[in-house]
Amino acid sequence: MTAAWSAFARTGDPGWAPHTPGSADVRVLGAHGPVAEPPAATAACWQLAAHPPTVPGQRAPGAAHGTDR
């Protein structure tokens, strides 16, 4: 194992970015405070991903065969 890998294994710091005491807090979203509401465009994208539009006569995702949304 090289010295760089040994240092990484020991500290978890890759060495290419400055290590700050708060950097662990950044890795977990919302762990130390409220998570902001997503912008409307992002919320619309998530809604579209969860409920994709269907063409009349096309089987809806997860629907029983022969049904229409």
Image (cartoon, helix red, strand yellow):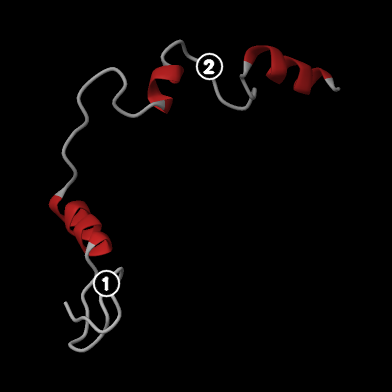
Q: Name the residue tied to disc 2.
A: 19
Q: Residue at x 13, y 52 (%)?
A: 40
**Which residue appears farthest toward the right when viewing the image?**
1
Name the residue nearer the viewer: 44 or 18.
44
The numbered mark at residue 63 is: 1
Name the residue nearer the viewer: 60 or 21.
60
Residue 11 percent across, percent down from the top left: 64, 13
In the image: residue 61, left or right of residue 12: left
Q: Secondary structure at mark 2?
A: loop
Residue 10 percent across, percent down from the top left: 69, 12
In the image: residue 40, left or right of residue 11: left
Image quarter in which the N terminus is found: top right
**Quadrant of res 30:** top left
Kind of residue sitting beneath label 1: Ala
Image quarter in which the C terminus is found: bottom left
In the image: residue 50, left or right of residue 24: left
**Which residue appears farthest toward the bottom when viewing the image?**
57
**Quadrant of res 55:** bottom left
Q: How far apart, in angstroms, are the residues tagged by discs 2 and 1? A: 50 Å
